[in-house]
Structure formats: structure tokens, C-alpha cells
Amino acid sequence: MAAKVVIFGVGLIGGSFARALKGAGAAATLVGVGRSPEAMARALELGIIDSVAQSPQHAMRGADLVLIAAPVAQTGAILASILPFLEAGTVITDAGSTKSDVVLAAREALGERVGQFVPGHPIAGRETNGPDAAIADLYVGKKVVLTPLPENTAADVERVAAAWRACGALIHQLSPAEHDKVFAAVSHLPHLLAYALVDDIASKPHAKQLFQYAASGFRDFTRIAGSSPEMWRDISLANRDALIGELDAYLAQLTGLRAMLACADGAALESVYANAQQARRQWIEAIEAAETPPRHGSPE
Amino acid sequence: MAAKVVIFGVGLIGGSFARALKGAGAAATLVGVGRSPEAMARALELGIIDSVAQSPQHAMRGADLVLIAAPVAQTGAILASILPFLEAGTVITDAGSTKSDVVLAAREALGERVGQFVPGHPIAGRETNGPDAAIADLYVGKKVVLTPLPENTAADVERVAAAWRACGALIHQLSPAEHDKVFAAVSHLPHLLAYALVDDIASKPHAKQLFQYAASGFRDFTRIAGSSPEMWRDISLANRDALIGELDAYLAQLTGLRAMLACADGAALESVYANAQQARRQWIEAIEAAETPPRHGSPE
């Protein structure tokens, strides 16, 4: 159990981490830090945290574990602000959606103390945000990807992993570059594509008529375009090399489909559609199998 | 009330139409026609239809209203098969997702009798299919777009509209070309984009790793890629001119976003993302307002 856990940003991600740790009895004291006094007061009122730190110095005194759950572009500034008060026994982690840039920012901010920073990314979320959105079971059965640095000790990585396991999460490890390549494909590109489609339609002269006839398929396809533009601007820029690579592959794919349409090649179109349908069905079946609790053959 | 209603294809769309008409007391006799004897037997067993027609001749005798709820590519063949038995008092409609091609097929199949065909498209659906998927309230509060022909009489259009209104649907009218342009943008293009993304990812050497980390955002974005490849091949080809136009606009949009990424223009990216987020929020609010039942100020 961590005696003192400090959370920068007590919204959906940080607040749910706090609630889960408290529920599991895995933290004695939970301290919140944030830019918005209203949000911090609300987190306190909801019982998510035990106290609000008035300064980085106050927050970091005797801290066992620190989670930075703020927009990725702020990670460097937060690390720089706490470095003067960073004790030898403290381990820091984060919840950012990109990792190469976060590692770069951490190296710049922390210098030779970077070994105390274990980068992480919980694969969980919702469209809601703020302390009121925080729930204790957000991470149950979800993956947390840690991207440890060569400078991290095994014990420090384990301290972070243990906290996430206490929240019910499953620990995975990738390198920062692997992480960013994977999430460029399965998360960052789809966000860009959804934003692009809604903006494309909204910019047409007959946009009002188009939206009038958009239905549930469009709603699901564009749900991620309801996400924070600032957050996704930061992610897009932070991971832009990998994102451009994925976007180029997708543009080539669309150009191929356009050619099939232009020459009315129904067999080729159907082959792409069928391959996609089958791959998605296998993926959904694998998810559902993973989410089904195993049967225990206990007597009685 | 229509005395005899005939439905070609008693799956989700046709079966739900039958259940809704029966529930509203808007049809005395419901007759099903279909290629699969098993599906027709099941529809009968479930009480969706009152009888299964053994031939087009048998089906069409004394029919007041006919709904063709089969894949759009079959519309012409079905119309041709019933023409020899088409009585003067019968009105035919369809439920196809494209309209220009259906109108063309109807003109070819029915010739001078095309005035008895009122093209339609209910904007409702789910991923499930077959008679077991049919539900009585599928169309409640949903739009049905009719695209009447110059040859249709007002009374025939009204007979089709009245049947859909009895199912709880809201009637809209567009020209076939307007319809196809609208749905190319808000439905056909998103389907193509979702299929394209899943196929793109499934074709990569590290596809297994990518799918492992795909989460709820990816799941929603690609939900429509779970749809029938044959059906969407037909729709893509039937509406390919409008679809290519929308795809070209989207490719231009993506090319613009790629340029913003390449020169790290965060302000331009955020502007597109924010415009999309705001447009989507307004759309969702408009939907929710339309779905909220009006308060009736009735006394007592």
C-alpha cells in the first residue's frame, strides 16, 4: 500500500484512479493538485481526495506515488515544478495518451532524476469529464500500458504497476515508440478521421439538410469527434510522425477504394468490406471472450 | 387501413414494418414472400405475417400495398416478377438505401405501370437481421424519406405515407437525386471509411498487436463495418457517382489536415477539431430536442 498518493488533475482519469485506490484500500492519503480551485473543491466535497495541496512543495512532501493526469502538453511544466521538491523515495507516473513526447519532456524537466518517472497510459475513458465523472471501476479489466525507461528500477516500475492492478487494471509493457505507433493507428487516426468528416459536412452549403438525415451509424462513427479539441490537438502534434504515417497508409487505402468505385469493381469492393467485417467480428469475439469471467471449478 | 399488405423480405426492415402495422391495426392480412423457406417459416411462427405466398401471383391477388424490403440490387427482378399480376388498385413501395438506381430499375421493370411504384427509404436499422430481429417499434420517431415520381398520384403517395405513419414514422420527401446525395455524405461514405480503416489495420503485419490495444472509441467508429458486405457493395455501386463526389471532398479534407500536421500548425488543427465538436454537439442537441416528447397542457 502507498502511504501518500498525489494526483495532478482530479478529473475523470485522475479522479477515477483516486476512487479505485481508496476503494481497494491501496492508499492511506490522497492529495489532489489542480489549476481549477472549483474542480479541486468539488473533488474534495465528493470524497475523491482527502486534501488539496496548496503548492507543489506541500504536495510532494513524503509522497510515495505521483500520478500526472493532465493534458500531455503540460507534463513537462508539471515535472519541472515538482523537481525541486522531489524526494528520493517518490515514484512519478503519468496517464498521457502519447509517450515519446512525454519521455522527451520528462528527460528535459527531470534530467538525471528521470529514473523516478515511469511513463504510463491507461486505456480507458469516456466522453464525460471533471471530478463528477470519476468512478471507482473505470479501470476494471482495462489495459494500462507502461513504457518503462532504461533508468527505471524494477521496484519503481512495480510500484506503479501495483497501484494500477489495485484499480483492477491489466498491465502491459511497450517501448514508447511502439506505444505511439500502435495508438496512432487504433486511436489517434480514428479521432482525426471523425473530426475531419464532421467538419467536412458542417462546411457544406447544405449542412443543415445533411445533419437532418444523419442517423445512428453516423452518431457512433463520429462519437469520438465529441472529444476535447485542445487535448486532441496536443496528441496529434505530439505523435505527428506516427500519425502522418498512418494517415498516408489510409489515404492510399481510400485511393484504392476510389479506383474500385470508378471502374465499378464490385468484387474488389466486397472483398475489402468482407475482410473488414470478418476482422472486426474476430476482434469483438476476442474482446468478449477476454471480458467473460472464467468459470472456477470450485467444489460446492 | 390496408386490407392486404404484401412484404417481400421479412427480415429486420420488412418484419418490423409488419409488426408495427399489425400492432396499429393498420393491416387486415399480412402476406410474406422470400427466398429462404426457413426465414419465411420463422416469420410465420413468430406471428409477424399471417401467411406465406407460394408464388408472386398468389401474393399479388387483391394486394393493397406491397413493400419490397430486399437488397436494392434485387428490386428490378422482384418488380419484373410481379408485373404480370399487378392489379390496378395495388401500390408498391420499397425500403432501399439508394433511390436513383431503384427508380431506374422500376422504370425498366414496370414500364408504363411505374406510377404504381412510390420509392421510399426508412432511416432506421440495427446490426441484427432476420425475422427474429424484427420489432414493432423500430420506426417510432424515425424518418421515412419518400422520393415520389411525377407519375405517382397523390392518393398512392398518401397510401404509402399513411402506412409508415401507422408505424410511428415521420414522413419526409426528397427527389431521388437529392436523397442519394444526402445519404452518400451521411451514411454511404462513413460506411466506406469504416470498412477502409478496419481492412487497413487488418492488412498490417502487426495487426494482432494493433487490435489488442483498440478500445471503445475504435469500436464505435467501426461499428458500421460490421454491416453486410454484399449489401454495402450494392449500395456503393448503386450510388457511386455521389459517393465518389463525397469521397473526393473528404480526401481533400484529409490532405489539408495532413499539411497542418506536417507543419505542426496546432491552431489550424484545433480549429477543424473544434468546429467539428461544436457542429456535432449542436446536431446531438437538435436530435435530443426532437426526441423529447412535447408536454401536453391538457387539464387533469
Image (spheres, coloured by chain):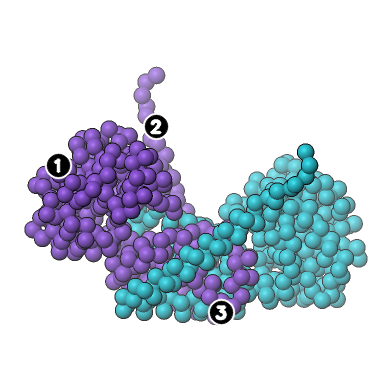
Chain colours: A purple, B cyan
The 10 Å Cα crowd at callout 1, few under 14, some 14 to 19, many 20 or more, is some
Q: Nearer the viewer, residue A216 or A232?
A: A232
Q: Which residue is mark 3?
A: B245
Q: Quadrant of the C terminus of chain B?
A: top right
The image's mark for residue A62 is 1
Question: Which residue is at 86% across, 68% downward?
Answer: B154
SS under mark 1: loop
Query: For mark 3, does the 10 Å Cα neighbourhood hold few (<14), some (14 to 19), or many (20 or more) residues?
Result: some
Q: Residue A70's x, y, as percent?
A: 30, 55
Query: From the viewer's perspective, is residue A47 above or below residue A279?
Result: above
Chain of the residue that carries numbered disc 3 in the rendered image: B
Horizontal placement of B51 versus A118: left or right? right
Q: Is residue A53 visible?
A: yes
**Label 3 amino acid?**
Gly
Between tags 1 and 3, which lies in front?
1
Q: Which residue is mark 2?
A: A295
Q: Residue at x 65, y 51 (%)?
A: B292
Chain letter for the residue marked with disc 1 in the picture: A
Is residue B247 at all visible to an observer of this figure?
no
Q: Is residue B298 above or below residue B92?
A: above
Q: Quadrant of residue B213?
A: bottom left
Tell whether label 3 touches label 1 (CB within 8 Å): no
**How far apart are the two marked residues, 2 and 3, measured between alpha carbons?**
53 Å
Image side of residue B183 versus residue A171, left or right: right
